[in-house]
Image (spheres, rainbow, N blue to C red):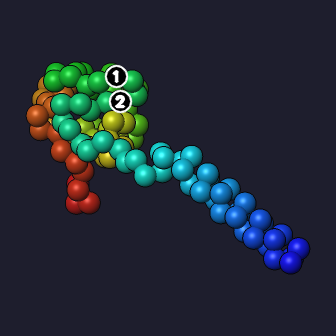
Amino acid sequence: MKKLLITIMLSSSFCFANAATTESSPGATESAPAFNNTQIKCGTQVLKDGDNVNTLADICKGFKFGKNKAGFLDDNSGKPVVCSAKRGELNLSSCALKTPQQ
């Protein structure tokens, strides 16, 4: 009888401990926000239409510039982005998620 009680107590305490650790990590189910070309972030800076491409090289992760296009990681959505740039100024309305071909 003692063994049965000990077994039940141990198994129930294990169930409670397991449930507590599962509920304490709600961030695991949350995902990054969807990509929005009006809310692109590099570091803490929210990009604006006409931002100078030269200044973005220092603050954007994975920044690359060439052929009037700029590519970098959007810190808001966590996804790689490609935008067109004219005369060294960023055009946010042209920004889109980077495809494997780009």
Which residue is labeled 1 in the image? 45
**Quarter the N terminus occupies:** bottom right
Residue 67 is situated, as x and y percent measured from the top left of the image, at 18, 41
Q: Is residue 71 left or right of residue 27?
A: left
Residue 31, disc: none
Task: Locate residue 53: give its quadrant.
Answer: top left
At 22% across and 48% down in the image, what residue appears?
97
What residue is at 48 percent from the left and 46 percent from the top?
26
Identify the amino acid type marked 2.
Cys
Judge whether 91 appears above or below 64 on screen. above
The local crowd at label 1, few if under 14, some if 14 to 19, many if 20 or more residues have their Cα within 10 Å, is few
The quarter of the picture where the C terminus appears is bottom left
Q: CA distance from mark 2 to mark 1?
A: 5 Å
Q: Residue 69: in sight, yes or no?
A: no
Residue plotted at (40% across, 37% down):
61
Left or right: where does residue 43 sit relative to residue 66?
A: right
